[in-house]
Image (tube, helix red, strand yellow):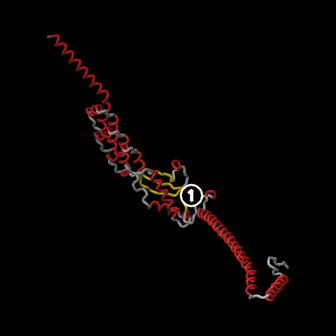
Amino acid sequence: MFLLADTISVLLIGVGILILLVVAMLVFKYFNLWLQSITTGAKIGFVDLIAMSLRKINARVIVQSKIAAVQAGVDLTTRDLEAHYLAGGHVTHVVRAMIAADRANLPLDFRVATGIDLAGRDVLEAVRMYVKPRVIDCPDPTVSGMAYLDAVAIDGIRMNVKARVTVRADLAKLVGGATEETIIARVGQGIVSAIGSSDSYKDVLKNPDRISKAVLAGGLDAQTAFEIVSIDIADVSVAGIQDAANVGALLEAERAETDKKMRKAEAEGRRAMAVAREQEMKAAIEENQAKVVLAEAEIPKAISEAFRSGNLGVMDYYSLRNIQADTGMREAIGGTGGAKGDKPKES
């Protein structure tokens, strides 16, 4: 009986010592954090710290973030911080962003801040970008490899343009809004369109601010995560000669060369048609000459038929021969040709 009582006593003492050791370890582990929260007004209880450990939450991150918020006058609950930590968010960045927004009188709700953070955006950088707008180049040489935008005015002059766009973050559209690449693309498109609608390159060189105003009035920051503050034309110039500055003249020269080739082809076609027509006429002449020869071959037959029928006498025949001889002599004297088959004499 006494042996059983002694065994129970030893077990109770061991359990008590174990409990004391666990409590001592917990006190040793969380006492500093609890003391910091109490002295700074964060008011995180010792039990809450132990509960964080059971939920696998880094108590130090929660305590330090709560202390920073309280010291800055930002009202955040411990439960909200724990929920964001469990969701995989960056508690420290969110709290720092809330403090920065409060200092800048920027209305930033904690739910919006956590949503931005969970969406993969750097909420602290977004707040900094709102307070201090960023200047981006258009075009961006590091992305597109182009140092200037190419634009052509109505008069055909090609121009090189470089702009600088000042943007600040739009916290309300940061989740789901387009990125900087969209801003650069839209601004570049607007500049090219504005220069393309200018009557002369001189107007662009004289009033480059008119281009920036026209682009800025186009609402290019719609559905983006940024708000365009200003668009400034940093550099505008006429393209170099080696870069074909006068695109209009180049196009006119190419058009003239094309027209020249077309006219030449048409002339070749007409010449070929003329040659074909000439060959057709020669063939027609040969055909008519053959017909004449055939007709002349019928004359002796007709004379013979006239003799047989009595319509032509011997004297009539000799008179016809004399007339032919006289005609041949006169043609020979006049140089217009002799008998059949003779060529005209050259004087």
x and y percentages locating residue 270 in the rendered image = 65, 70
The three-letter amino acid code for the residue at tag 1 is Asn
Identify the residue at the far left of this view: 1
x and y percentages locating residue 301 in the rendered image = 74, 80
Residue at image location 21% in from the left, 17% down from the top: 11
Of 97 and 233, which appears nearest the observer? 233
x and y percentages locating residue 322 in the rendered image = 82, 86
Name above or below for residue 70 compared with residue 33.
Answer: below
Where's the C terminus, which quadrant?
bottom right
Where's the N terminus, which quadrant?
top left
Name above or below for residue 134 compared with residue 278.
Answer: above
How many marks overall? 1
Name above or below for residue 335 compared with residue 177.
Answer: below
Q: Secondary structure at mark 1?
A: strand
Please indicate whether residue 65 sits to the left or right of residue 150 in the image: left
Residue at image location 23% in from the left, 18% down from the top: 14
Please indicate whether residue 333 sits to the left or right of residue 145 in the image: right
Of 94 and 282, which appears nearest the observer? 282
Provide the residue designation for mark 1: 160
Residue at image location 27% in from the left, 22% down from the top: 21
x and y percentages locating residue 3 in the rendered image = 17, 10
